[in-house]
């Protein structure tokens, strides 16, 4: 079973997502965390919420009356300030754009990963403008 990340915003008790599949970001989380550590950035994995994955792996049950994991994500999910997400993703994008020869990311994946970082940055910027919270939800 494969997984991807979806960028989410939480504003006034409502969640929204671009529902863009961010495959490369999820599959390279460990390498991105290593870059973050070496560059003094907040860890990339701190942006991730596992509510949907835990439900699909039968580690969480939906509250009675809920049809999906939205309510659980709102109440129990991992949410960060957009400024943290922006610092991490902008820092990663800058590093990967200028240090591609030293990157632990395979060159075949680098273009897609940079495009996905741009999508995450876009949604984080929207969240910042709206006064919303942000996460990257692991979707299975």
Image: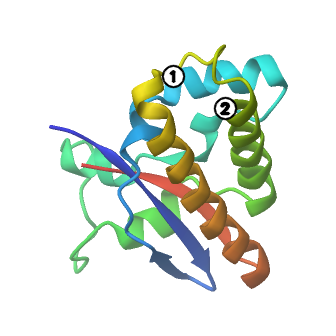
Q: Residues within 10 Å of mark 2 (few under 14, many from 20)?
A: many
| Residue 114 pos. (x, y %) | 56, 45
Q: What element does badge 1 sit on?
A: loop
Residue in front for this viewpoint, 43 or 11: 43
Quadrant in which the N terminus is drawn: top left
Mark seen at residue 96:
2
| Residue 27 pos. (x, y %) | 39, 32
Residue occupying image coordinates x 64% and y 18%:
34
Residue in front for this viewpoint, 13 or 80: 80
Q: Residues within 10 Å of mark 1 (few under 14, many from 20)?
A: some
Q: Which residue is the extreme one toward the right?
A: 40
Residue in front for this viewpoint, 78 or 5: 5
| Residue 38 pos. (x, y %) | 78, 17
User: Which picture quadrant has residue 83?
Assistant: bottom right
Mark seen at residue 41:
none
Q: Determine whether, in the image, residue 67 is placed left or right of residue 112.
A: left
Disc 1: which residue: 105
């Amino acid at each position: 079973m494969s997984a991807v990340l979806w960028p989410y915003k939480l504003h006034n008790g409502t969640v929204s997502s671009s529902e863009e599949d961010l495959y490369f970001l999820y599959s390279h989380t460990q390498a991105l965390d290593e870059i973050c550590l070496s560059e003094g950035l907040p860890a990339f994995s701190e942006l991730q919420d596992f509510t949907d994955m835990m439900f699909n792996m039968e580690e969480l049950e939906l509250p009675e009356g809920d049809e999906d994991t939205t309510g659980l994500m709102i109440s129990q999910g991992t949410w960060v300030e957009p400024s943290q997400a922006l610092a991490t993703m902008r820092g990663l994008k800058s590093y990967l754009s200028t240090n591609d020869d030293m990157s632990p990311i395979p060159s075949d994946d680098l273009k897609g990963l940079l495009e996905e970082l741009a999508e995450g940055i876009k949604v984080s910027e929207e969240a910042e403008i709206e006064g919303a919270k942000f996460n990257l939800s692991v979707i299975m």
